[in-house]
Image (spheres, helix red, strand yellow):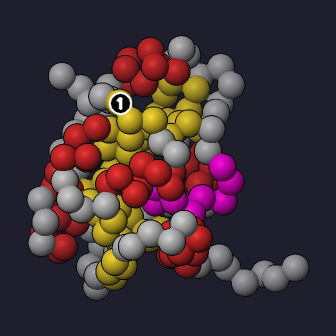
Amino acid sequence: MSDKPVDPTRCVTEALDLHQVSYELRTFSQITHTAEDAATAIGCTAHQIVKSLLFKTKKTDKAVLVLTSGPNRVDEEKISAHLGQKTKKADAAFVKEATGFSIGGVSPVGHTRALPFILFHEDLLLHDLVWAAAGTHNTVFCIRPQDLVHITDAQVLEVKEG
């Protein structure tokens, strides 16, 4: 067994390659803290940025990954209603354990274990291409949103507030 640290971006690219989808990987010298920062660095709109937010079910502590558009805020009541159980925002330790990624670099793919629930906000399908974190705070990948839905086996629904 190796003590070599896992390269989070490699986990993402291996997952993308496994599904044989077209994508573009970019690494930036600066950290992109917000969807707006990422959009500026990439040269796209914040609506094309995929935020990967992790929640967990309150009773069973099952991971719930929500993929939503950059400017959107997620409505936890909509998630809970869809799943038929209450959810809450996951803390940093749970995020790292469930996905293998740290907050700010959580990718929609390449997790250390299969996630039981992945929800995909329908607004992302309005774009030809979207950009998502590729395992670190300064690495992203571009992909067709339809391909992202397919490879994550996500359920498409309305999850934003308002």
The answer to if 108 sits in the magenta stretch is: yes
How far across and down, in percent of the image, does residue 105 sit? 43, 63
Write the residue at 33% across / 65% down. Answer: 143
Q: Main secondary structure of the magenta part?
A: loop
Q: Residue at x 46, y 51 (%)?
A: 150
Q: Position of residue 86 (x, y in %)?
A: 52, 17
Element assignment for label 1 = strand
* Residue on which the image places disc 1: 157
Q: Which residues are magenta?
A: 107-114
Quadrant of residue 73 within the rendered picture: top left
* Residue 156 coordinates in the image, percent (x, y): 38, 35
When the figure is inspected, residue 17 is found, relative to residue 50, above or below; the finding is below
Of the 4 image quadrants, the one containing the N terminus is: bottom right
145 vs 84, left or right, is: left
Q: In the image, what residue type sits under mark 1? A: Leu
Is residue 155 something one can see in this rendering?
Answer: yes
The answer to whether residue 120 is magenta is no
In the image shown, does 27 or 5 lie closer to the viewer? 27
- Give residue 139's position: percent from left, percent from top: 37, 75
Residue under the image location 24 percent in, 26 percent down: 161
